Structures are given as structure tokens and as C-alpha cells.
Amino acid sequence: MRMDLVELLGVFAGCCTTLAFFPQVLHTWRTRSVADISLRMYLLLTLGVSLWLVYGILIGSLAVTLANAVTWVLAVFILVMKLVFGRLSRREFDSRPK
């Protein structure tokens, strides 16, 4: 596949937007704090990124496909942490003496 200037611009844009997720993933992993993360927002984001990924595959765009594949993995990772760490936090809260 020949990488023209427009596709290269797309790859660079995808790298920028995808890299923006890494600080959130690292912070969430390190702190195990998910209280300020919206489950609904990440569910909707993951659905949207999934659709963009399918779109990128269908139109044969390397930039759209790669950016959304990596973003999808990161968004799912945050969703999993939200579900797992959120349950752990609720158990700790519920087991505190009242």
C-alpha cells in the first residue's frame, strides 16, 4: 500500500489522538481510582471507536484503521478497569464499619 501525503497526515493525526489516551490509562492503572470515570461515556466512546474501526477497514484507510484499533484497545482497557476497580471500591466501602 502506497502511503501518500494525505494518508500520512491521517496517521499523524491518529497518533496524536490515540496518544492522548495513554495518560488516562496509566493514571487509572497506577491509582486504581475509577470514581471520576463515566461508565456511560466510555461505553459510548468504545462503540463509536468500534464503528470507526469498521469504517476504516471498509474504506481501506490505514490511518483510520490503525488509530481506531489502538484507541479501541485503550478504551476497552479503561472500561475493564472501571468495572473491576469500581467493584473492588464498592466492596471496600460496603465492608467499612458503620
Image (spheres, rainbow, N blue to C red):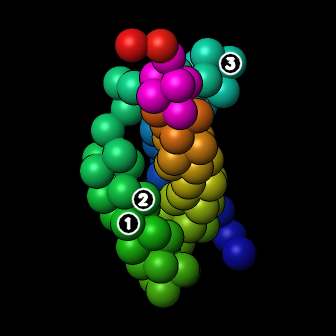
Q: What is the x, y in percent for residue 97?
A: 47, 13
Residue lying at 28% horizontally and 50% vertically, measured from the top left: 40
Q: Position of residue 58 (x, y in %)?
A: 48, 86
- Mark toward the start of the polypeptide (2 vs 3): 3
Is the stretch drawn in magenta largely helix, strand or loop? helix
Q: Residue furthest bottom?
A: 58
* In the foreground, 34 or 15: 34
The kind of secondary structure element at disc 2 is helix
In magenta segment, residue 87: no
Return the mark for residue 47. Answer: 1
Residue range of the region highlighted in magenta in the rendering: 91-96
> Badge 3: few (under 14), some or many (20 or more) residues near its Cα, within 10 Å?
few
Amino acid type assigned to the residue bearing label 2 in the image: Thr
Q: Earlier in the sequence, mark 1 or mark 3?
A: 3
| Disc sitting over residue 67 in the figure | none
Q: Quadrant of the C terminus?
A: top left
